[in-house]
Amino acid sequence: MKRNFIAIFFILFVVVAFGQSPKYSNEFLSVGIGARALSMGNSVIASTNDVTSGYWNPAGLTSMKTDFDASVMHAEYFAGIAKYDYMGAAMTLDSTQFVGVSLIRFGVDDIPNTTDLIDKDGNIDYDHISKFSAADYAFLFSYAQKSNIQGLVYGANVKIIYRNIGKFAHAWGFGLDAGAQYKYNKWNFGIFARDITSTFNAWSFNEDELIVEVQDSIFNFAPENSLEITLPKVILGISREFPIYNKFEGLIEIDADFTFDGQRHVLIEGNPVSIDPHAGIEINYFKLAYIRFGIGNFQRVEEFDNKESMTFQPNFGIGIQYKGFSIDYTLTDIGDNSLALYSNVFSLRYSFNRKNTAKSID
C-alpha cells in the first residue's frame, strides 16, 4: 500500500512539475505584483507609473515622479501553502532614461520527501523523511526611454528565470518583454508584449534522486523532455482620468490579454487567438487616500452535468500615500469566487529624490 503511494506521489509530482504544455509554462509570472494592480484586476498596462512598471509595462518607468522608487510585496495563497514575494527598485538616469530591477519568487516550502521512506528490503523508517522546496524565481532588468514624439514612451525587459525543485531538478530560462505607452490629454494607451521571442526553460534532472528502488523493483521518474516554451502574449490597455467632485478624482482602465497558443476557456475563445478582458477603477481623495475595484480572470467552467458556467475574479483594495510612502492592500481570490480562498495582499512603496527637496508624487 505504502509502496503504491510513493509511486503515485512521484508520478503526480512529475506530471505537475514537468508535463506542462507551452500555454501553462512560467504561469507564476501571470499572477501579478503590487496590491494596487491586483485590486484593479491587473488592469494597469496603460496607467502604471512607478517601480512596478518593470513587471506590468516597463514604459511606465518614464512616469516616475522621483529619482528613486522601491517596493516590496508579500502574498500567500491556498491557506498559506504557496508564498509569493516581490521586491523591485527603479531610478532615473537622466530626464529621458530610466532603469529598474525586479525579483519575484513563488514557492511551496517544506514538502515531504519520502523517497527514502522504504529501504531496499521493504522496511519503513520515518526518520528518513526530509523536506524540500519547489520555487520559481524571475529576475527582470528594465530599461525605459521617452521618445521624440510627444506623449510616446517605450521600454523593454531582459528576463532570467530560475526554477528549482529541491535536489531533484532545476531549470534556467531567458526571455524578452517590450512595451509602450502613449498619453493624450486625459487618455492613456498601452501595449505590452510579454515573451516576444518566446521564453525557453531548459531543465536539468538529478536522475540519482529520481530513481527509487524498493525490494526487486526500480522506478525511474526522470522525464524525457527537458525543454519548456512560453509563447508570446500581447496585452492592450486604455485608461482615462476624470474628475468626480471637489478633491475627488478617478481613473478607469480596460485591458485585454491576447494569447496565441490555442483555445483557452476565457471570455472570448478562439483558436489560435483567445482574448481575456479585465477592468479596474481607482478613486482618490487629493491623491492621499485611494479605493479600488477590479474584475477579471473570466473562466468558462464545465459542470458535472455538462453545462457551462462562467466564473470571474473580483478584487477590492485601498491605499494611502503620504510623503513618498505608499501602503496598499487588496482582497482577492484565485478566480473561483470562493470565500475560503480569498487572499490578503499588502505592498509597500517608498519614493525619494537625490536632493533633499522633494518633488510632488502623484
Image (cartoon, rainbow, N blue to C red):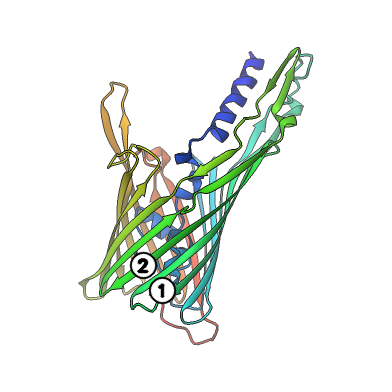
Badge 2 marks a residue whose secondary structure is strand
Mark drawn on residue 63? 1
Residue at position x 32%, y 48% in the image = 296
Q: Are marks 1 and 2 in contact (CB under 8 Å)?
A: yes
108 to 348, vertically: above or below: above
- Observer-nearest residue: 239 or 76? 239
Give the x, y percent position of residue 198.
49, 49
352 to 299, vertically: above or below: below
Q: Quadrant of the N terminus?
A: top right
Q: Nearer the viewer, mark 1 or mark 2?
A: 2
Task: Indicate the quadrant where residue 216 lies.
Answer: top right
| Circle 2 residue | 181
Give the x, y percent position of residue 349.
49, 67
Residue 279 falls left or right of residue 9? left
Residue 293 appears in the rendering = yes
Q: Quadrant of the C terminus?
A: bottom left
Distance of mark 1 from mark 2, alpha carbons? Answer: 10 Å
Give the x, y percent position of residue 66.
47, 78
Task: Indicate the amino acid at tag 1.
Answer: Ser
Label 2 neighbourhood size at 10 Å, few (<14), some (14-19), many (20+)?
A: many
Number of numbered discs overlaid on the protein picture: 2
Task: Indicate the amino acid at tag 2.
Answer: Gln
- Observer-nearest residue: 138 or 112? 138
Residue at position x 44%, y 40% in the image = 23
Task: Indicate the quadrant where residue 60 lies.
Answer: bottom left
Badge 1 marks a residue whose secondary structure is helix
Mark 1 or mark 2, which has the lower sequence index? 1
Label 1 neighbourhood size at 10 Å, few (<14), some (14-19), many (20+)?
A: some
Residue at position x 74%, y 20% in the image = 213
- Observer-nearest residue: 166 or 163? 163
- Observer-nearest residue: 33 or 35? 33
Considering every residue shown, the one lying at the far left of the view is 245
